[in-house]
């Protein structure tokens, strides 16, 4: 079984919920996938990083990452357990919806197309993006996709004396992709379940133009999720850089 496959007992969850700067306004967009690559945090959690370009004009790119595998301390799993039941990581579900929408295949199948390429990745030491070798999901790059997007206000974060990321009291506006569909307007779940296209319209009616404010507007002490750090050097890792010839 592929390391990206979910166990058979994992509960099915719908991510197509109807509800609630340079960021895109909340709404439904036709876009092109400019890049999809994997990255890894210092804790060995794996992120699925996307760059979308909105069709029909010179708009800012949308960039987001979805955590598709937990860190080493939590077992490097694609799922989590709650009340005795297993569920896909939320980021895994969203990334899988992109894979199904674009290719008709699941995330594990799309992972088979991964090739190591040079991509611009944020370097915390240089404090800027730098070309870095990362696995690129080639079956998704350059393909059309429809996406439901929320505009979200959230806390900016910075490291404290303990090296933990905490809210600074300032905020920023970002985008969060809720789910994906094909160019014909069918969501991934509608494709899988052979249902008529309806969910994008329902979602847009309730969410277009809305803003979700998750900011606290004050300094706090709760640590945030790991940011992406140095790659694992384990033999066979997707993130291991090949030695120079």
Image: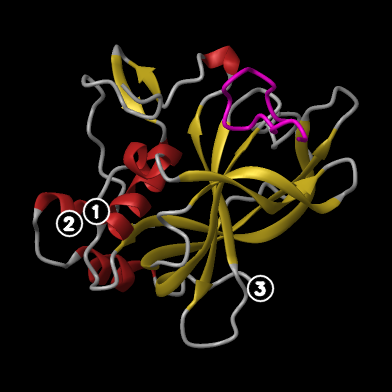
Instruction: Residue at 40%, 66% (x, y): give it.
Output: 143
Q: Is residue 243 magenta?
A: yes
User: What residue range appears in magenta?
Assistant: 231-245
Q: CA distance from mark 2 to mark 3?
A: 32 Å
Q: Mark 2 or 3, which is nearer the eye?
A: 2
x, y (%) of residue 139?
40, 54
Q: Is residue 55 magenta?
A: no
Which picture quadrant has residue 171? bottom right
Question: Which is nearer the eye, 173 or 240?
Answer: 240
x, y (%) of residue 200?
27, 67
**Res. 191 mark:** 2
Is there a contact, CB below 8 Å, between mark 2 and mark 1? yes
Q: Is residue 27 left or right of residue 237?
A: left
Q: Does the rendering let one see residue 18? A: no
Q: Is residue 85 left or right of residue 207?
A: left
Instruction: Residue at 47%, 60% (x, y): give it.
Output: 141
């Amino acid at each position: 079984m592929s390391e990206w496959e979910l166990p058979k007992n994992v509960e099915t969850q719908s991510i197509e919920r109807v509800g609630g700067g340079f960021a895109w306004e909340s709404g439904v967009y036709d876009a092109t996938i400019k890049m999809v690559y994997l990255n890894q945090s210092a804790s060995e959690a794996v992120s699925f990083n996307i760059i979308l370009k909105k069709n029909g004009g010179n708009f800012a790119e949308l960039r987001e990452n979805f955590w598709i595998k937990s860190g080493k301390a939590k077992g490097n799993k694609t799922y989590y357990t709650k009340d005795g039941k297993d569920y896909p990581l939320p980021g895994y579900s969203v990334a899988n919806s992109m894979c199904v929408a674009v290719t008709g295949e699941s995330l594990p199948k799309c992972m088979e197309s991964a090739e190591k390429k040079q991509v611009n990745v944020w370097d915390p030491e240089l404090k800027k993006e730098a070309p870095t070798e990362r696995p690129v999901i080639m079956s998704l790059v350059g393909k059309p996709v429809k996406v439901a997007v929320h505009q979200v206000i959230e806390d900016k974060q910075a490291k404290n004396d303990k090296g933990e990321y905490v809210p600074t009291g300032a905020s920023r506006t970002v985008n969060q992709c809720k789910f994906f569909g094909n160019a014909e307007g069918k969501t991934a779940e509608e494709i899988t379940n052979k249902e008529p296209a309806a969910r994008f319209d329902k979602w847009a009616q309730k969410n277009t133009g809305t803003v979700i404010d998750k900011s606290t507007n004050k300094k706090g002490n709760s640590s945030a999720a790991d940011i992406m750090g140095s790659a694992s050097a384990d033999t066979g890792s997707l993130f291991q850089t090949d030695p120079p010839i």
